[in-house]
Amino acid sequence: MFDKKFEHFSVGETWISRGRTITEADIVMFSAFSGDWYPLHTDKEYAEKQTPFKQRIAHGMLVLSAATGLQKMDPEIIVAFYGVEKLRFITPTFINDTIHVEMKVLDLQDKQNGTGVVTFEEKVVKQTGETAIIGTFKVLINKENKEG
C-alpha cells in the first residue's frame, strides 16, 4: 500500500497483503520481548480449562505487529506513523491461524508542508474470513513535490 507518494492515493482505493501464519514460536518470542506472559497466551492448561477460547490465543498486539510487517513500506515514501483510532480486537487469533491485511483509503489530508496524511481502515483477516482486528490508521506520506 505505501509504495507511492501522497498524490497517487485515492479515497476508496483498496489493497490486500500476502498471508502469514501465526506460530507458537511467535507467541513465545513476543512474550519474551514484551514481558507479557499472561496465561491466556502462554499456559496451555489454563487456556483450555479456564477460558472461553479453550486454547491459547495470540496477543492482540502480536497480531497487529505481524500485520504491520505484511504491508509494503518504502522509507522514501513513509514519513511516520501518525495515529490509530477505533482499534478493536474482534476475533481471537489462534496458533496456526493465517492472517492477511485488507486496507481501504478513507481520507486524504494535505498538510501543505510536502506531506499528507492518508487515513485508512485496516482489517486483519484470518483464513476463515473472520476479521480479527479492525481500526482506523493514519500514516504521514511524502508528496512528489516536497516544496508544498
Image (spheres, rainbow, N blue to C red):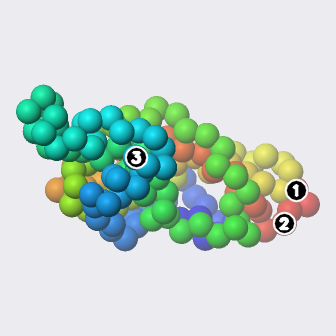
Q: Pick the residue in front: 24 or 112.
A: 24
Label 3 CA crowd tier, 10 Å (few <14, some 14–19, many 20+):
some
Q: Which residue is mark 1?
A: 148
Numbered disc in front, either 1 or 3: 3
Q: In this view, which residue lies farthest toward the right?
A: 147
Q: In the image, which disc is placed on residue 36?
A: none
| Residue 57 horizontal side relative to residue 80, left or right | left
The number of numbered discs placed on residues in the rendered structure image is 3
Rendered position, 21 above or below 29: below
Q: Which residue is mark 3?
A: 31
Q: Amino acid at mark 1?
A: Gly
On the image, which quarter does residue 109 sit in? top right
Q: Is residue 102 visible?
A: no
Task: Please tell me which of labels 3 and 2 falls first in the chain.
Answer: 3
- Residue for point 48% across, 62% down: 69
Label 1 CA crowd tier, 10 Å (few <14, some 14–19, many 20+):
few
Residue 121 locus on image (x, y percent): 46, 46
Q: CA distance from mark 3 to mark 2?
A: 43 Å
User: From the image, which quarter does the C terminus lie in?
Assistant: bottom right
- Residue for point 61% across, 40% down: 83
SS assignment at label 2: loop
- Residue for point 16% across, 44% down: 44
SS assignment at label 1: loop
Q: CA distance from mark 1 to mark 3?
A: 44 Å
Q: Amino acid at mark 3?
A: Ser
Q: Amino acid at mark 2?
A: Asn
Asked whether the residues under the numbered discs 2 and 1 touch, taking CB atoms below 8 Å apart as contact, a structural biologist would say yes
SS assignment at label 3: helix
Q: Pick the residue in front: 7 or 113.
A: 113
Q: Pick the residue in front: 14 or 33.
A: 33
Q: In the image, which disc is placed on residue 145?
A: 2
